[in-house]
Image: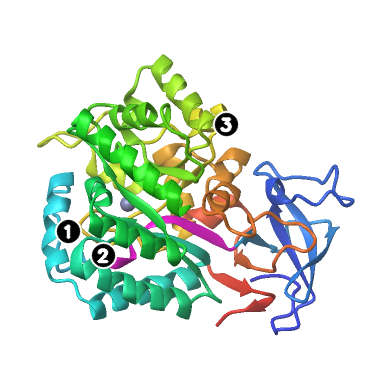
Amino acid sequence: MFAQKKTSSDIQYLDVLVPRSLITSGRDLLNLPVSSEGLCSLRISLGEGSISNFQKISYSSEQCLGLLLPRLVEPHAHLDKAFTWKDFPNLSGTYEGAMKANLEEHENRDKSKVRFRAEKALKLGLSNGLRAIRSHVDSFGFIGDQTWDVLLEIKSEWETKIEVQLVAMVPLDYWSREKGVTLAKRVSREGGLLGGVIGPPYKKKQLRECLFNFFCLANTLGCGIDLHIDESNLEPGEGLRELFYVLDRIRIDVPITCSHLSSMSLLPQKKLSFFAEKLAHYRINVIALPLTNLWLLSRAYMKTPVKRPLAPIQQLQKAGVTVAIGGDNVQDPWNPIGNFDPISLISAAIPMAQVAPWQRGGLATFTTGAARIMDLEWDGSFDVGSPADFILLDADSWTSALSFPQDRKVMINGTWIE
Ligand SMILES: [Zn+2]
């Protein structure tokens, strides 16, 4: 088990392995010995709920230091429909099947069901080491309003444990209607974001008009934007092209996030680079969602897909775009698996996206990049004064941490949680 630490609320230090790329403190830590997986052994002193000092320690193979990570974030979830697969399965695994089952479930949705799902998700997320969750919310009509009532209550009940951010998701043209404007004002008052879905088939004229109204509304209200866009293997990058068409013609000052961008990876290299540079130019963030993309997209009857649409994470990072990886749907018609576990997600991203946590850019998609996209106060890096908010894994390497479920402990403000 874990070495050398006190397990009460008066913990003074932790002797642990830490990813070097997360340490931003320069104090005496230059030339730290680093393992082949980028881990270094450190004594981290704690005081008043934050890191008070770092000290190099020597590490022998007989010692078992745990692997210490910051509490992590889930930048893209759907709390309102989580765990609905059992009653509304989508056994065909198609996008259309998911939409159909989702609509059936939506007709049966009520406040108590939403509360049950969200609380279950947050309890799981807390014990798995999440400190923040951004959830998209089906916000259309009466049940949409009721869902916001419940999730806002839950957001406030959980604020000391998990920061919840809510994104109102409605058909894009809804934002041009009176009801949409009323919803947007409420979302803005509550510190939420505005969202929607842009996917094929693209009706360009209509889409441009909707996007123009949508951006103006978000801009007027000072509301951030997070869109589901190009979640498809068809008409690669067409949604993004329309987004740029509008952005080239207006000025917008609110942060924009594009979730999915799956079909972008199917573009020819030159066009892909051009789009990546435009995303960087407009400071648009990207959230890649490998689990749902690889499960739902490029389906053909009795065929295993060979083209795997997924946001081109490394090309985007190379162009200067901040990228995060999210878990998206959990046990609902869009994805039969998942459990709000950021460690499982890091593990899945290794084969799915060729993203490795021992690479700086790879780890950033789960830590600093994700925190920046969510505009969190702490970006998840370790410095003197950083919060003592940790996940401690009973593992002495990334491979052992990610190969099978690990014992883990979660610390909030210097105290291990039960
Ligand atoms: Zn989503």
What residue type is disc 1 on?
Asn
265 relative to 174, above or below: above
Mark 1 lies on residue: 102
Tell me the residue at 46%/43% (across/down). 256
Of 273 and 393, the residue lying toward us:
273
Marker disc for residue 67: none
Q: Quadrant of the C terminus?
A: bottom right
The disc, 1 or 3, on the residue closer to the chain's N-terminal end is 1
Q: Residues within 10 Å of mark 1 (few under 14, many from 20)?
A: many
151 relative to 358, above or below: below
What residue type is disc 2 on?
Lys
Residue 132: percent from left, percent from top:
51, 64
What residue type is disc 3 on?
Gly
Circle 3 SS class: loop
Q: Is mark 3 within 8 Å of ligand 1?
A: no
Residue 339: percent from left, percent from top:
37, 64
Mark 2 lies on residue: 81
The disc, 1 or 2, on the residue closer to the chain's N-terminal end is 2
Q: Quadrant of the N terminus?
A: bottom right
Q: Which residues are magenta?
A: 71-80
